[in-house]
Amino acid sequence: MLPSSHQRFTSALLLGLVIFSVVPTSALTEHTNQSGTCSGSDPDQECVGGVGGGKEAGLESEEQEEDFPCTLWIAESSIPNAGLGTYTAIPMEKGELVASFGDPIIAHIDTTHEEIDSDYHWDESLFHFPLFDTDFPSMFMDFGATNSHPTLANLKSSFKNFKRDSAGLHRSKDPGAGAITMYNHLDWEITDNIQAGSELFVDIGTGYFEAREKKIGYVRTEGDYEIADKVLFDALELVRKEELTEEDYEVFLISTQEETSEHIRALLPSNFNDIKSAAEMGSAKFNLPNNIKTPEWLKENGWCLDDKLKYGISKISQAGRGIFAKRSINIGSSIAASSLIIFSRDFMDIQDSYRDGATGRIVHKDDVILGKQMTLNYCFSHPDSSLMIIPNSAPVLYINHNGENPNAKIQWIDTFNMKTDDWLSKSPEELLKMESGPMIEYYALRDIKADEEITLDYGPEWEAAWTKHVESWDPDEDDKNYIAASDYMEQSLFTVRTKEEQEDNPYPENLDTACYFTLYSHDDHGDNETVVEGVELDWSDYSANRILHNGAELECVYHCKILSSQKVDGTKYFDVVLFEYTNPQFKRYHDVKGQCWIPGHIFVDGLPSEAIIVIDKPYTSDEHIDEAFRHEIGVPEGFF
């Protein structure tokens, strides 16, 4: 039996890139209790009833601010009604990576895209990175609250440092194996040079917003802005030729709306005198003039993301990864804040299911529950509640349990659009429709030293469940021989073997080969419409200029079989067959001919060895261990 200080992994989940909450300036205040301001280093002293600490509260020294400058801020987005946004406090160049907290990806096992009406799910097909071993929707975390814009996007996901590992836990000896996500270090890369104070945007595509138009209204597309820019260019030419005057401009706008749409018309300046500046800036920048903030505005209105915490391997047994204090943090100070995602408890069930042959849809057997989603481990809830609340900021994902002497605690923060009391007075049905609500804050229960791991008390129910899990844990004898694909690669055990060679020298039974390849020609980007199933292609015509190994340049990777090898000038190359990535039981997206689409299977000759890796076979990785620990994190007494 482990001692009560035996602590585990964290709580928080994944962030979609559209967030509907904001930290008001009024939240950035000092913690107070009935006796006044919290002070001292007594570990038993708690601060209650207040919110947020920081520079405004006088809790940070000027020396600390100089040693640990803030480079990322969360504040209200410059996009109207979009809630929070993320801003860079420093100029950044194309190709730079934004500060990372080991941003994770959490799988939601064996469920279909149609089932999930959540703004916070991301499907693996959007990234085509099938190093996952099931066909599932997953949720991608980032560092803050980044919104989408089709033309001002300056940020994209990057797999340069992506890892798929178990953080040192092995299923043959560690009861924590399978209880934490193996997917981490999703990075975010700047796509264009930007100046200090710029809001960060991604482009998540028109499909995301089209599917939610009834819910959130029409969101303008890249095509809308392109049409508006063309209209502005034409208008400016007419003005220069004196064929368009201020008196004629209203008629011009009306005719534009009739020829295009009201969405295009709304992007054009209502003032005739603004035509020149709008045309020069472009309709996107003209309609979002405040997307670059001053340092003073960010300090007054924002919440720093990266000046207090750093990511690392936890010092706590079985915890895997952890989050640590980058510098000393005073008692009562704010450590981090996060908005919330709301799910029902039923959402955490893994149900037995089958595909209906007539409709092609997944049918769940409601009365057959196979297990619980790993997502459950990252949720806050109460035993009597039907709801799960999930913090959606990457750093707090790694806050681990300490039942004896935690140094952090959570509490509510009122948001700009709803007070906590209003939110808590709503029914579960109303809350589920909202999906996001107020924010929670993690604050220091005592003085925290630099490099000290941040911990919470997960509550007695969680600790009892963990203790029971450890006592009953009984690994299979065969588990001793298990090795994950990531470890097999990292330990340099992998050499490329042809199908014939594998008959005499097979890979471990849980591993399979995968190949990086891009169907677009590096000369003219090709035309995948001309590629048919079974076609034979040559690597040098398509992927030769885009070596890849970590996926940074070559985005597409497929299950593959190594058919034969050949040597050219002393270097070995391989002929392979690539298979469209899918789990046949949950086949989806076959008709979507995106960048990584291939028609069933194709043959590719001449792959270099660095374009071939091993991956885990479906349902063999740690998250699929039947006895893996699953339990939500408890909330403090009186939280609800």
Image (cartoon, rainbow, N blue to C red):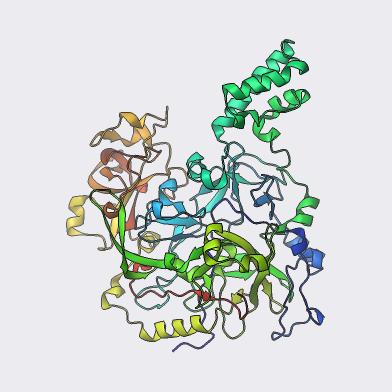
Image point (59%, 57%), residue name: 143
Q: Looking at the picture, how far across and down is residue 373, in whole percent?
A: 41, 67
Q: Quadrant of the C terminus?
A: bottom right
Q: Vertical placement of 160 versus 344: above or below? A: above
Q: Looking at the picture, how far across and down is residue 499, in whole percent?
A: 20, 51
Q: Vertical placement of 171 versus 301: above or below? A: below
Image point (73%, 69%), residue name: 51
Q: Looking at the picture, how far across and down is residue 581, in whole percent?
A: 32, 48
- Count of all numbered marks drawn on residues in the image: 0
Quadrant assignment, res 580:
top left
Q: Between residues 251 and 470, which one lies in front from this camera angle?
A: 251
**Residue 336 visible within the image:** no
Q: Vertical placement of 159 versus 632: above or below? A: above
Image point (70%, 26%), residue name: 280
Quadrant assignment, res 472:
bottom left
Q: Vertical placement of 280 versus 639: above or below? A: above
**Left or right for 113, reference 193:** left
Q: Quadrant of the N terminus?
A: bottom left
**Residue 567 visible within the image:** yes
**Left or right for 517, reference 55:** left
Q: Looking at the picture, how far across and down is residue 31, in whole percent?
A: 76, 73
